[in-house]
Image (cartoon, rainbow, N blue to C red):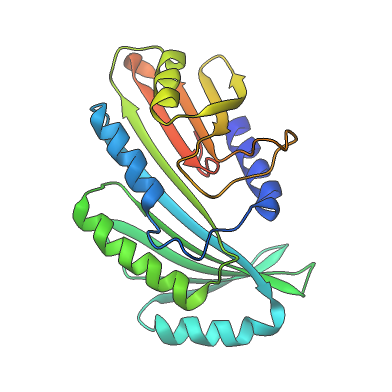
Amino acid sequence: MKTRFILGSIIFTIIIFSFQTLSSASTNQLTEINQIANLLEQEDIFIDNWEVIVKEKKDYQTFEQMLKKVKKEYEGYKFEKTETKNATKFIFKPHKNDIVDESFILIVPKSNAQEYEITYKITGNNWNEEIQETYENKLEEITRELFTENLTKFSCIKTQSSVIMDRVSMLNHLQEKLNVQALNNIHEEDFTVLSGFTPRWETVIPTSDKSLPMNVQLAAREGLGGKTTITIGTPIITTEY
């Protein structure tokens, strides 16, 4: 399990610099989450956790202005400044919400003072029309106020299926439903990961095969009692699977 987490973190760190950015014409910031959720519900598979992360690197000359803007816009949020070996983090979180967890993070690397990174992250354990509408509007407002067309977005859903089906058959079924063309497969003793491309979503990662980029990952891990944990992410999975 540790290997999976480290591998995912390394991949996530490396490829974030090579994304094609989202089209500024895209108005529905939760399209991907909603489509995945609808697909899983059609299969009688219900969501355990969902996550959306928006990131953007900015010129350091704009940092003080951005910090003041975030403090002003989100005055009621809890603020924390932390120091690590590699960076200084400015973290803003709203007061506890049992439905959805939000956070803003401004990260200033100590090795490169020419740029910083702003991240907005929302996670939840339930998904319905009310949550979708509320956070779709909020995410659109936040991306308009604090980000530009150069942002990158990651969407991920994790769930558990009690359907009696082996993990490979489960992934093949979801691959067909999402119209995914496979680019790479990883098979281990208790988990399988499929990386590929679907025409459903815009954000992509260039691959060595320049004719077809990557924008989706499907993972399935077999657990106790015959249950399979399924994780779907676009353009990659950002959580431990």
Q: Residue at x 41, y 75 (%)?
A: 78
- Comparing 171 with 82, the one in front is 171
- Comparing 5 with 131, the one in front is 131
Instruction: Report the side of 94 relative to 144 (left or right).
Output: left
Instruction: Report the side of 159 relative to 104 (left or right).
Output: left
Q: Residue at x 80, y 67 (%)?
A: 111
Residue 12, given in percent of the width and then of the height, sits at 63, 46
- The quadrant holding residue 174 is top left
Q: Residue at x 75, y 69 (%)?
A: 110
- Viewer can see residue 222: no
Residue 103, given in percent of the width and then of the height, sits at 44, 65
- Comparing 171 with 26, the one in front is 26
- The quadrant holding residue 228 is top left
Residue 209, given in percent of the width and then of the height, sits at 73, 33
Q: Is residue 148 above or below residue 29?
A: below
Q: Is residue 47 above or below residue 222?
A: below
- Comparing 140 with 12, the one in front is 140
Q: Is residue 91 above or below residue 61?
A: above
Q: Residue at x 50, y 85 (%)?
A: 69
- The quadrant holding residue 150 is bottom right
- Viewer can see residue 197: yes
Residue 162, given in percent of the width and then of the height, sits at 28, 20
Total marks placed: 0
Instruction: Report the side of 218 relative to 64 (left or right).
Output: left
